[in-house]
Image (cartoon, grey):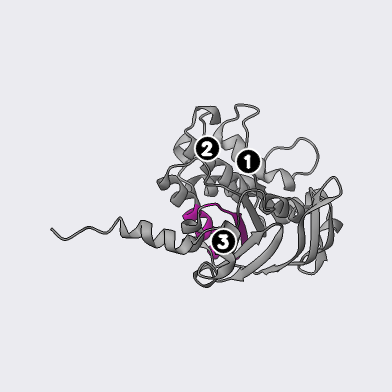
Amino acid sequence: MLKVRNMYSGYDKTDIVKNISLDAGKGEVLCIVGTNGCGKSTLLKALINTLPYRGSITIDDKEVSSFSRKTLAQKIAFMGQFEQIFFPYTVFDTVALGRYAYAHGFLKSYSKKDNEIIDNVLERMNLSDVRHRLINELSGGQLQRVFLARVFAQTPEIILLDEPTNHLDLSYQIDILAALRAWVKENDTIAIIVLHDLNLAHYYADNAVIINHGTIVSHGDPRKIFSGAPLKESYGMDVKQFMLDSLSKWKCRKQ
């Protein structure tokens, strides 16, 4: 269980997220939505303790700030919205980086268990046939699958993703989120995802959080909270009505 209570965090002594309280349990996909600059990414950075915070963030009742970096990496995996290629590793080597948190010493060969985990993840993400290709040769959709496979190879208890579907076509967006949801349910883990596309959040999330000006204004089943006033107030428009109007244009007229 991940618990956040009365948490504040930000930059240069200025709080961006304020008085955040939420829970996420095993097997849950939680989506965080809100307008640009509302604090979504800041919240994720506080959860992995890369930003200092006040208040409490606990995993199984142990404060996140008390974990060593290595122990925290075994519990939480993070995939940012601007993953970059610094070296042209192969697909296998990139996914294998997920096992670094379990390494003993600076250099070591992969154990039998490591290789089994990496091979299983490559197969699961349909990457086995490109395992020896360099990642700078891949399409954007393939590359994002590789980065998600690296997260899976880390075998964390909690997965944090910051806009993982950005700049992907619809088929790859569905591919990424369907793979993530299946992994969470099968492995009884937690996924917290920042998404801009409310349709995808509505479809894949068990619960959602709406953030406005750094505070949570609604939390619950997206089928309920996306119909309420907080979403309209946060976006400054009637989002639900816009979605319904858009859907009506897809309906075929009788000839």
Mark on residue 23?
Answer: none
User: Are the residues at dot 1 and dot 2 in contact (C-beta closer than 8 Å)?
Assistant: no
Q: Is residue 146 left or right of residue 79?
A: left
State which tag comes first along the sequence, 2 or 3: 2
Disc 3 target residue: 184
Residue closest to the far left: 255
Q: Is residue 106 above or below residue 19?
A: above
Magenta stretch encompasses residue 190: yes
The answer to whether any part of residue 189 appears in the image is no
Q: Position of residue 10 (x, y in %)?
A: 79, 50
Badge 1 crowding class, 10 Å Cα cut-off, few under 14, some 14 to 19, many 20 or more, is many
The answer to whether any part of residue 181 appears in the image is yes
Circle 2: residue type: Leu
- Tell me what residue is drawn at x 69 percent, y 57 percent: 213
| Quadrant that contains the N terminus | bottom right
Badge 3 crowding class, 10 Å Cα cut-off, few under 14, some 14 to 19, many 20 or more, is many
Mark on residue 96?
Answer: 1
| Quadrant that contains the C terminus | bottom left
State which tag comes first along the sequence, 1 or 2: 1
Disc 2 target residue: 143
- Tell me what residue is drawn at x 60 percent, y 41 percent: 95
Circle 3: residue type: Val
Q: Nearer the viewer, residue 177 or 252?
A: 252
